[in-house]
Amino acid sequence: MNLSTFTTPSELSHYLQSHRSQAMGFVPTMGALHLGHQSLIDRARRENAMVVVSIFVNPLQFAPHEDLDRYPRQLEIDRVICETAGVDALFLPTAESMGIKDGLTQIIPPTTMMAGLCGRTRRGHFQGVATIVTKLLNIVRPDRAYFGQKDAQQLAIIRRIVTDLNFPVEVIGCPTLRAESGLALSSRNQYLTPTGRSQAAVIYRSLQQAHKLAAQGERSQQSILAAVKNELSTVPEFDLEYLELVDPQTLESIEKLDRPALLAIAGRIENTRLIDNVLIGC
Ligand code: PAF
């Protein structure tokens, strides 16, 4: 089937109406598609008769000082990627057609899930994500929606919203794709110079140290975090924002590794904010 493109919710809904009998997979994105997005699209393609992808750089999830204006945009390339990957419908709404305006009704995820990790410095970010994902799920009404595990806090919050608000959709978390160096694929990697990219490999290297320690039986949060920080210190250009060991579902801090835990990290290289995580103790 050819790729059909829509820019308003009503055009898309009208088109999807005649396909409602088929299983529908949905991949919401902000564009600048890379192999990580492609792996979500490929999985959606395998598991559903219809695949819808949205590209919308959501202003609600950027604070005024963040990179909304310079966020990478490459619509023509993204369109070709979607076409080649066999996407059926590409949704490219504008802020206006999405009804983004002052006084918009917003979805507020549980404060306990937004207090730590990225939520500590990115105030309002997850409210913006939750609001737009809710709107997109209501417009597309997919059977399955696909999100990357790299944004683990986002994934946990979306799972929680879908459960709490009874959305009839299965949320599927997909593994992080990595460059050969281990650097997690991200649209923001485009901001890095080759030197920055190779320095950024320390993030995954340090997470791997923790994984190894946990596999050897280390259970203390302190020792695990210390080992990660030790590895990170080999690249002084890496400016650590947070390093936390949390429950993967509730995102509450874990003191002792007596159950699977999410080890999550954020920091900057060349002023580009990068995040990554691994599951340990499982
Ligand atoms: O992960 C992203 O690209 C965005 O946060 C999402 C889920 C598309 C919402 O804008």
Image (spheres, rainbow, N blue to C red):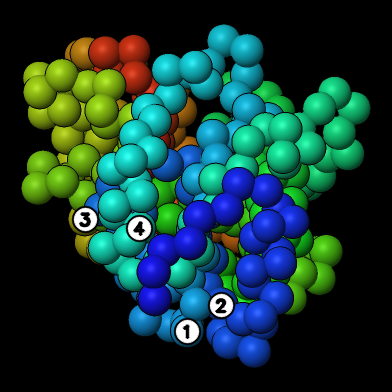
SS at badge 4? helix
Image coordinates for residue 126, horizontal then vertical, percent = 66, 38
> Which label lies toward us, 2 or 4?
4
Q: Tag 4: Cα neighbours inside 10 Å, few (<14), some, or many (≥20)?
A: many
Q: Determine the residue positioned at 64% across, 72% down.
A: 16
Query: Which label's residue is closer to the chain start, 4 or 1?
Result: 1
> Which label lies toward us, 3 or 2?
2
Out of 169 and 54, give the one closest to the viewer: 54
Image coordinates for residue 172, horizontal then vertical, percent = 51, 70
Query: Which label's residue is closer to the chain start, 3 or 1?
Result: 1
Query: Which label's residue is closer to the chain start, 2 or 4?
Result: 2
Residue type, label 4: Cys
The residue indicated by pointer 4 is 82
Location of residue 266 by image quarter: top left
Q: Are marks 3 and 4 in contact (CB under 8 Å)?
A: no
Q: Is residue 7 left or right of residue 260?
A: right
Q: Is residue 204 left or right of residue 2?
A: left
Ligand 1 within 8 Å of disc 1? The answer is: no
The residue indicated by pointer 1 is 49
Q: Check residue 212 in the rendering and tell me which mark sits there, or answer none.
A: 3
Q: Determine the residue positioned at 11% across, 28% down.
A: 198
SS at badge 3? helix
Q: Determine the residue positioned at 26% across, 63% down.
A: 84
Q: Tag 1: Cα neighbours inside 10 Å, few (<14), some, or many (≥20)?
A: some
Ligand 1 within 8 Å of disc 2? The answer is: no
SS at badge 1? loop
The span from disc 3 to disc 2 (Cα, nearest Å) is 39 Å
Location of residue 118 by image quarter: top right
